[in-house]
Amino acid sequence: MPDPWRFHGGVHPDDGKALSAQGAIRKAPLLEKYLVPLQQHIGAPPKLVVAKKATVRRGQVLAEPGGFVSAAIHSPTSGTVSDITECIGPGGSPIPAVEITSDGQDTADTCLEPIADWENAAPDVLKKRVGEAGIVGMGGAAFPTLVKLSPPLAKPIDTLILNGAECEPCLTADYRLMLEMPDRVVAGARIITRILGVKQTWIAIEANKPDAEACVRQKAEGTGIGVQSLRVRYPQGAEKQLIYALTGRKVPAGGLPMDVGCVVQNVGTAVAIAEAVLDGKPLYERVTTVTGTPVVNPGNWRFRVGTPFRAALTLAGGVKEDPAKMISGGPMMGLTVYSLDVSIVKSTSGILLLGPSEVSQFRSGACLHCGRCVDACPMLLTPATLSVQIENERFDLAEKWNAFDCIECGCCAYVCPAKRPLVQHLRRAKAEIMVRRRAAQAAAKR
Amino acid sequence: MTGAIFVLTVMGLLLGLVIGITVKFFGTEPDPKVEKIEALLPNANCGGCGFAGCSDFARALAGGKAEPNQCPSTNTETAAQIAALLGVALGVRQPKVAVVLCGGDNTKAAKAALYNGVNDCRAATLVAGGAKACLRGCLGLGACARACPFKAIEITGASLAVVHADVCTGCGKCVATCPRKLIRLVPTSATLHVLCSSPEKGAAKRKKCSAACIGCQKCVKAAAGAVSMEGALARVNYDHQPSPPGAIAEVCPTHCLQPALLDVTPVPTPAASASEVAHA
Amino acid sequence: MADHEIRLPDPGKLIVSSSPHFADPQTVQKIMLTVILSLVPACLAGIVCFGLRAAGVLVVCCVSCVAVEALAARWLKRPMALRDGSALLTGLLLGMNLSALTPWWICVIGSVLAIGLGKMIYGGLGYNPFNPALVGRVALLIAFPSVMTTWVTPTPGQMLGDAVTTATPLGTLGTLHRWVPDQVMACGGQALSYWDLFTGNLAGCIGETSKVALLAGGLFLIWKKLIRWQVPVCFIGTVAVMTGVAHALAPELRAPPLFHVLTGGVILGAFFMATDMVTSPMTGLGGAIFGVGCGVLTCVIRLWGGYPEGVSFSILFMNALTPMIDQFTAGRPFGARPGKEAAP
């Protein structure tokens, strides 16, 4: 039975998953050096707790949460803190980073004990572990998971949804996880269910991964966890669209899933939580897809956080031709990266290379008012009108036309026949409106 | 025909009467003082005074809620005229001018990649930070030039924002616009600028830009207190200005230390519109 | 593993841009060329009916529209956008809206007005509020009323026959002011059947006579999702309903609905002119409102106005309302609370 509630709009790009879907997840060999960025999540920057030249073990805390919405960062291997420097963040802004030089021993830190009897452990103990392990949303947004698992009392949660849709084309990391570690996916789901004390738990998987669905369904049998097949339509995995598809509840505009009693977690996050609880392992490695037609051997690897893209691409055999784009994430929402020194972080779901013939550039052309973007927008916005307002720097109008409801899924720009950079316009408008709001607040304080 | 003329005449007279009565009973007398002040103000609505445009400021002045020297965009004589009109003393004011603290144009600063997207600095910083190797360099996409109400900022042919000090009134609108915070308001008396804002180590900067401050400290020795080091970056102490500046600027090996430009020509070309898309 | 053999990406060749990095293969040029393709059957039908004269008019309009666009772009220092095919489409539509007897110089003037006044002065494709081809046609209709209403009797199959002028059924109806089937349904001394109206064996503009060819092209565009079905369905439906009511109330005076739908430019207008992307609303609901508006205005002009035909005027009028309809029909964002304004 496909999802009962269909969201509006969406697109159906070529999924390109065949390139990397076949091989099993491989373990990346140990590197000599890791460059660990000190901001891998949305929220407050964490506080560095190690000094230069300090000796660290694998899984030792390098930085502690710098606030409620923040997450700890752990060392990817054992060795020494060889430098405290800066690196290019995923958004292109410089962020502080720690360079770890490996001692080759990969000695594990033992401060986190496995919680063997987790099925009877107190929810607070499990929740504490999620925080200690520095777990953040691994689907791409990197929101600290502990915050999502600590809903205010005024917002009772009754539904947990594990997002295994993986609607982004080309990426197969979640697919391989569900195929190879369905027990961990289900264990993670049960741990989160226990933490939240919810009545119903769903694992949602797009219908184009029937084998992964069968694996998860088999392991979920008898646990009370439902497995739901979803229509293949981008952006099926977007939080609000996913909740609607499964429950028919609409997250209010400007609101959060908890406003409708839901929590959504990526399946990768669930696996990380299972490992934190069952193995006492903090989040210092993740499965990342390295793919794209220029890549010699596309596939999925388990990389330590702080692995430079250079090392990841070397492992994948390098490239056959010079790519025109290097993307951190998938083709619909990923960020372009131009340096091979950028590190894999907790939210790097994929490294995608596109050849020159696959890249369609944005152009300066007038909007034709064809309305294809209006049809495609899953948030029911009017990107055509918004983009013209933003070109004319009328951010006040853009705010009135609900620019802030844009989820930047990219459907509008995907369908635009004039190849207008609609998502960039919207992102610019949001940034400009925030700058103006902050200025107005500062003026009001004076 | 005559009927039509008659009807139109009567209608005109009646409507005129209605307007006359409305003005008589509901109209407000404009404050002549406010009008006179407004005529003296630049009416560029830059917001540099902290009020919502020049009319708002004029009303505040007439109501005694603002000082004539709060407007950064009037010269001293005009401010004195306004003060005389209000019958208040003109306070001391420090006229300011904006300066872009980056000298890395296309010929000096390296490009790390090709940029395809909206011709606007903030839009570019949202996309991998633009394509400039230096993450603190001027992107040259003209957000400040478009924001300037006085058209005092030029984007040079080599994609660098340059403030024309003779046109700039120091309203500060550009300062808030620059996503890389490269624009500073300095006293108009400033004679010397360090045209670099990157705190990176000298060697790292030198790789990315031939006009970067490499932290050699030659200027600190030559300027006797006018320049000091802030990490790996030299900073001009704007309260302590040397003259003549030329001799000190000459010691800088990268020509990052520059005498202030005073005799600049009017801005020739308008900045590109934000509806243009840069094509790689 | 031999590291030196592994080739890594060259950062200097990498493009940075915003997401998404995939794009649908649809382009403006493809859209325009598909629309032109869908008009080919109607053009061929026009040429079969009215001979090579009709082909001449179409060619002159197309060539001069493209030339005017090129000259205007050069003069206004705008990027040359001939490759998008929009000027060619405007030329074709303008030609289809003219009589086969239109002299070449009037075609050229029409092209100058359509592209110059209808499109380029606003900033080119995408910025024009009105359908350029209709701007050209209506301007010519006002400037050269007699030339624009001189029609030729169809001579199917004869490519170079003599031109025998005649009136269109709608024109006759307009002069008679009453529904006399024998007189209205006549063309060059021959009685017309509804089948003739449908296949195109009647006097009229080059491209508007053959309804069967137009329907084929229109349905092709709906199948290709390049036009919204709401516009033609609501347009034609409204014309049928309104003229049907008028006919039922005064059968002596008013023509039956089938006559109104099958004569004049209703089918051409509904499928190809009212659906112009740039000048029609962006949503299905907007398209429906637009179509109903066009239908009502067409009927008002035909039934009570001074012109026998009102399709062009009604579409131009509704073009002016398009921004308002778009604002009115803009969706409320997903999850917006009821009562919250969709758009200001």
Image (cartoon, coloured by chain):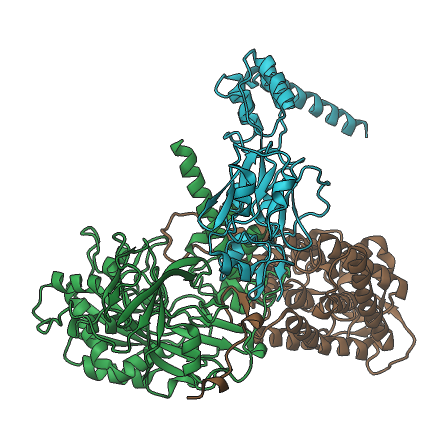
Which image quadrant is residue C281 in?
bottom right
Q: Residue at x 51, y 70 (%)?
A: C21
Quarter holding the N terminus of chain A is: bottom left
Q: Is B59 left or right of A441, judged from the image as shown?
A: right
Q: Position of residue C109 (x, y in %)?
A: 85, 59
Using the image, determine if residue C95 lies above or below residue A353: above
Q: Is B239 left or right of C220, judged from the image as shown?
A: left
Which image quadrant is residue A300 in?
bottom left
Using the image, determine if residue B98 lies above or below residue C289: above
**Which residue is nearer to you in this view: C300 or A28?**
A28
**Which residue is nearer to you in this view: C244 or A354?**
A354
**Do we see residue B19 in this rendering?**
no
Q: Position of residue C311 (x, y in %)?
A: 69, 59
Q: Is B2 left or right of C342, judged from the image as shown?
A: right
Q: Which residue is drawn at 43% across and 53% down?
A: A404
Q: Residue furthest top?
A: B87
The colour assigned to chain A within the rendered structure: green
In the image, the chain rendered in brown is C
The colour assigned to chain B within the rendered structure: cyan
**Which residue is nearer to you in this view: C247 or A445?**
A445
* Numbered disc total: 0
**Which residue is nearer to you in this view: A130 or B112?**
B112
Q: Residue furthest front?
A: B221
**Do we see residue A441 in this rendering?**
yes
Q: Position of residue A350 (x, y in %)?
A: 40, 74
Using the image, determine if residue B239 lies above or below residue B144: above
Q: Position of residue B108 (x, y in %)?
A: 62, 58
Quarter holding the C terminus of chain A is: top left
Q: Is A179 left or right of B14, judged from the image as shown?
A: left
